[in-house]
Amino acid sequence: MPRRTPGRIWSKGSATSQSSTSTRSDQSSHSSLSSHTQYTNLTSCSDTKPVAKHYHNYEEREIVDGCIVHPDEHEHEQDPRASTETYTSTIASDIDDASSRPPSLCPLMRHICYKPDAIATTPIEFGELFPSTRRILIQHDDTTPDGNLNLRVDTELSIAKGHKLKLTLFHLRMYDLAERQFSLRRYQRQSGREVCNSRRKYLKPAAKKSSSSSSPRRLSFTSTLAKINLKTLKSKPRTKPAQEIRDEESDDDFSSFAAQVDVKATIPTDTIRIEFSNYAQVELERSKTGDGKYEFEYWGERYSWRRNIYRDESELVFSFELIAASSGVCIAHITPDKLSQRQSRQEAALGGWVPPCSLRLTEKQVSNDLGDVIMATGLMSLVDDCIKRHWHEPHRS
């Protein structure tokens, strides 16, 4: 659990307090040697170009290479949904048996793990650092063998003598890539404070209407008339009362509804259903046009993460911008960090498939709840797009 140390509290708007400097000087030396961070402070919110990133030697340990397999989930950690399971009642109804699911995507284990260079924020520190216009770093967790199924979300503070202190704000745990089964937590990986969890949305196939079951009473009545000698029929058949007709239609509607309830949701879509701990639900839908746009609605307002492609020297680079539909204003953006060819090869050799990126909010007045939604949808848009480009996963909806 995150440590609560009064000496790490600072005033909002200042770099850090004197007590923070004195109590964390040893940790700051590690952060100054960070292997996955940038030390250039972006002062312009509109600056979406990637900046140079430098790697340094770091303490490492080798891990046996292989495919990441999750045995008993949460074997060594507490399930963050234990106290908020009441709002996940819709999950079971949306999942078919394993035979109908798409095959799971399995990234490689990281055969080199680095010594942690970031510390978890406390609740008070988190409130000071997020949401804000600070630069936020997104990268695979390079401290664990299953880091390719985890993303760390950090920020940096400048402390005494030019040193940097890196603090973890969020951690995204990815349990099943094909099912988009993720868990976003505050502070660190072991934290019990789950912000939200997600899963791919499935649709139910349309129930087939049988001609014999659509109006059984009418068909029975028609077949009876066919057997009657019309010449001996002295009078017209009795007209059914309106109430009797309404009862028959109600029975038919109930039969159709009952048949639809029994149908399981087996049609996968490109929509990710996100359920937050405050009971809010957001559906992040990938555009069917294939332009990399992810749309969602929150409190009646429409938003979209739009992927942009531009050329940086000899390579094509992507970025995401969050646009509010009502105003057309960019609220946040995600840009990749610039790596050298050697660094790119090294990251690929370790199995990394989500490139190191930076996220920045461009709006100063963002509520805490909206900040969580922006972070969750931004990370999941980035991950979903990387899955489709890395494993060439087909469009499903």
Image (cartoon, rainbow, N blue to C red):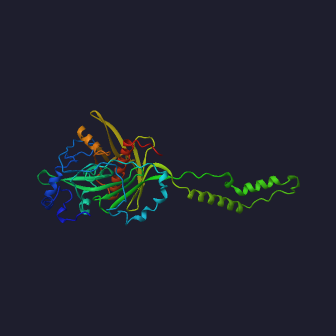
Whether residue 82 is visible: yes
Q: Is residue 28 left or right of residue 2?
A: left
Residue beneath the point at 56% across and 58% down: 262
Q: Which of 184 and 299 is in front in this view?
A: 184
Q: Which of 239 and 139 is in front in this view?
A: 139
Residue 96 % position (x, y) = 49, 55
Q: Is residue 299 left or right of residue 312?
A: right
Residue beneath the point at 27% across and 56% down: 169
Residue beneath the point at 86% across and 53% down: 229
Vertical placement of residue 299 versus 383, above or below: below
Q: Nearer the viewer, residue 356 or 298?
A: 356
Q: In the rendered picture of this protein, how many numbered marks are placed on residues?
A: 0
Residue 42 % position (x, y) = 22, 46
Residue 14 % position (x, y) = 18, 56
> Can you name the residue that lies furthest to the left here?
161
Q: Which of 302 and 140 is in front in this view?
A: 140
Work out which quarter of the rendered image holds the N terminus and state it: bottom left
Whether residue 338 is visible: no
Residue 295 % position (x, y) = 41, 48
> Can you name the residue that lies furthest to the front here?
64
> Can you name the residue that lies furthest to the bottom here?
83
